[in-house]
Image: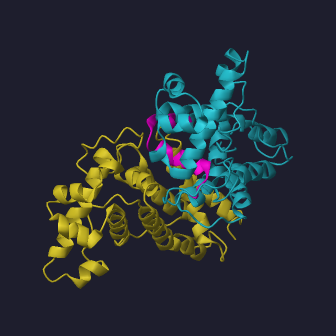
Chain colours: A yellow, B cyan
Amino acid sequence: MTSPQNASDLPESGPEGARRRTGGRSARIRAQVAEAVGTLLVEAGYDALTVDAVAERAGVHRTTVYRRWRDVGGLLADVLDAAADDGWRPADTGSLEGDLTALNQEVYEALRPGGTDTTDGSGSGSGSGSGGNLTTALIAASFRSAQAAGALTRFWEGRYARSAPVADRAVDRGELQPGLDARALLVTATAPLYQELLLLRSAPDPELPRRAARAACAAARAGVFH
Amino acid sequence: MTSPQNASDLPESGPEGARRRTGGRSARIRAQVAEAVGTLLVEAGYDALTVDAVAERAGVHRTTVYRRWRDVGGLLADVLDAAADDGWRPADTGSLEGDLTALNQEVYEALRPGGTDTTDGSGSGSGSGSGGNLTTALIAASFRSAQAAGALTRFWEGRYARSAPVADRAVDRGELQPGLDARALLVTATAPLYQELLLLRSAPDPELPRRAARAACAAARAGVFH
């Protein structure tokens, strides 16, 4: 369960990229624009995000940006859709607790202030207590743009769906009974990280990823998600 | 664990109110201003929230608002601090699962679109998928204002602290072993509601409050919070 932290490292194999792969120019522009969106968002927040500013930062003609992305909502949605469209798979550690802890560790790194961040690290946030990382900035933007909100939901639901094998493997190993709701298990495992780091803005606790994983395991073993 | 949904129903017994209770005029102004902040926030979002707009809506002289609250951050922080400063206590249902379900039910009502809302219900949100209720609007505002973010953290931490008796009672009844981290239990119980309704913007599932409570109970019984 990574968060959308890799906006500047966009795949060129998405539908758009595949269609226009010939020269790679279109994919390159998409990556440049996505990186500009991420950098501006982290450095100065949603209010600084205009099509013109993105075009200038990306070194792409503004007409190109308007034509292809139309507005800020379109830009944010594309960054999130592109981030979702990667090769991410959950780690296979050999145990349910290990797999959920690995997922949570990725969420933790994406959410903690100064955590994994594909910008150059100079972003100082915009005084909103956002911690200055891209994941938090994108989540904050989802409260400003319905298009970004929809894309963020697609991103997360895609991550939860791709993480379903974590539950399947636990069933195969005999750790869990068949027939459980994998999504409910995964939401339960990851939710405390968003609650602590994003909403409560708590000081990062390195024990949190494993504790939240253990809590979800215990609930799953008790049959709560069946 | 209620959410800050009662901004228009401010207590007059806060430090400010107590100090100036004599005529009640100061407390009345505070309540009028808080109601105006909530209504504007739900109806039109953070961008519509200016000291002048709040003063006009509240029918209070703008100089009074500037002098007492200074800016939008001060207004938001006061709404949240006033909401925190009520007589709220967690329900005592006789079981850990019952108590946590009751807490979660309050969070659920506060977060679900069209849920408990002290405005007149005419608010339509600002196109950000916020669902148009005050709790969501205040959380969204916390990504815009460091003062609001700090006040929201204080509000929630106050709620978690006041909910600690839920864990104590479970220990007294012999449901749980002594020595557990009550806050970790409470965060685990409530987090899936924020994750689903606020962040994932899922369709409200009436089973969610109880399922999240049962998950946290199972984890507590397994010793995860010890």
Horizontally, is A222 left or right of B57 in the view? right
**Nearest to the observer: residue A213 or residue A111:** A111
Q: Is residue A36 above or below residue B6?
A: below
- Residue toward you, B74 or B29: B29
Q: Percent from the top left, x then y, of residue B83? A: 66, 35
Image quarter hosting the N terminus of chain B: top right
Name the chief secondary structure element in magenta. Answer: helix
Question: At 27% from the left edge and 51% from the top edge, which residue is drawn?
Answer: A40
Q: Which residues are magenta?
A: B131-151
Front one among B53 and B112: B53
Q: Residue B208: x, y in percent?
A: 69, 62
Residue B211: x, y in percent? 71, 61
Based on the picture, tell me whether residue B135 belongs to the magenta stretch. yes
Rendered location of residue A179, percent (x, y)? 66, 77
Residue at (38%, 60%) from the top-left corner?
A4
Residue A84, magenta (yes or no): no
Q: Who's the residue at 64% across and 42% down the image?
A: B4
